[in-house]
Image (cartoon, coloured by chain):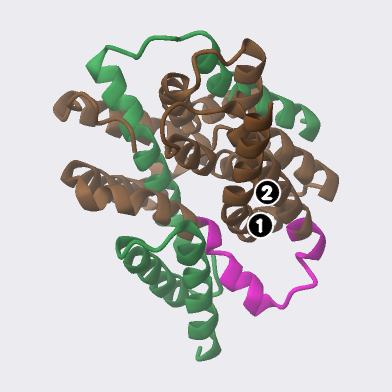
Chain colours: A green, B brown
Amino acid sequence: MYNIYLYILVMAGVTYLIRVLPLTLIQKEIKNCTLRSFLFYVPYVTLAVMTFPAILSATGSILSALIGFIIALVLAYRGADLFKVSVGACLTVFIIELFL
Amino acid sequence: MELNKSWYIKGLQDGIPISLGYLAVSFTLGIAAKNAGLLPMQATLMSLLNNTSAGEFAALGLISSQASYLEMAITQLIINLRYCLMSCSLSQKLDPKASLFHRFVIGFDVTDEVFGVSISVKGKLNPFYTYGLMSMSIPGWALGTCLGVVSGNILPRRILNAMGVALYGMFIAVIVPPAKKNKVLCGLIIVSMFASLLFTYLPVLKKIPSGFQIIILTVVIAGVAAVLFPLKAENTEE
């Protein structure tokens, strides 16, 4: 049986080290181009992988989720901030599900 | 001393929109935490200590599937690797006179949003500005998580369904704007989503635990992209 507090400590420890080590140890910029490029691409790949297709099963129906997903893409593309994109997607799902 | 105080107050002000955004998003995280079987105190503690939406979100999946501690550590390492790059960038932006103590404290809350706002300051970064941001955003994140767990089953099904996409909406808001200006990123996001679709539904691939699916896809796709499309200098800051 796994312990939830131990999970939390493992997460917090790893995440803190990732954040604090560069700030405290590495004073110079990373020079290796491939490594820099890899680190630059990581968040986009990870977040894209996590968002789709998982978002399709996050609501009551695939249709409402799909339309919410598309609206979020449009809002983000048009430069809406994090809060507006997030709330816009939620409102879209809410309205669509009223009609289902 | 007076200067530090005014930077702190400015940070508090700029932290308000971050905090409000966090409140909405972490509420969904709280709901997910409840579904994964976490108590309100456990979920709040997780948010207080981690401050990472994607990381915590993935962690909940791992916790409910009873993944190993090693799988948890590797997943957090891979998902949160971007903070490493942000910290590198922040170390150049930070006032060189900032003590080791300041660096240890700032390192606690290098999130997409706190980093983004910290780096937008003109000239060198005064640590007290980031402390102001942290003072607003950390309680927002933790409180939202707590409320999500506690009130999760008070809210009607319709509201819960709607809130279900909040976190994904936030991810989209993080990845889309930079992709608008960068065709490689745009292609990368499309390839990633398609690959993720394959891993979710194809017979053999779907057996791989979701935590390792994220690790495999990220390392392979970002790795290939790094070799095929290496960045020009000065292009790593978002």
Q: Secondary structure at mark 1?
A: helix
Who's the residue at 34% across and 61% down the image? A79
Spatial separation of the CA atoms under disc 2 and disc 1 = 6 Å
- Label 2 vs 1, first from the N-terminus: 1
Q: Where is A38 relative to B154, above or below?
A: above
In the image, is residue B165 part of the stretch drawn in magenta? yes
Residue B220 is situated, as x and y percent measured from the top left of the image, at 30, 29
Q: Which mark is residue A3?
A: none
Query: What residue is shown at x 73% (from left), y 26% (from top)?
Result: A9
Q: Is residue B113 left or right of residue A29?
A: right
Q: Decide which of B167, B108 is in the foreground and name it.
A: B108
Q: Position of residue B27 (x, y in %)?
A: 68, 58
Tell me whether circle 2 and circle 1 mark residues in contact (CB < 8 Å): yes
Work out whether disc 2 and disc 1 sit on a shared chain. yes
Q: Is A2 positioned to the left or the right of A54 in the image?
A: right
Q: Position of residue B128 (x, y in %)?
A: 63, 31
Q: Residue furthest bottom?
A: A99
What is the magenta range? B148-167
Q: Please name whichever residue, B185 or B234, is drawn nearer the observer in this view of the structure.
A: B234
Q: Is residue B76 magenta?
A: no
The disc placed on residue B141 is 2
- Letter of the chain that mark 1 sits on in the rendering: B
Q: Position of residue B84 (x, y in %)?
A: 46, 23
Identity, as a three-letter code, of the amino acid under mark 1? Leu
Identify the residue position indicated by label 1 in the image: B23
Residue A67, picture quadrant:
bottom left
**Kind of residue at badge 2:** Trp
Q: Secondary structure at mark 2?
A: helix
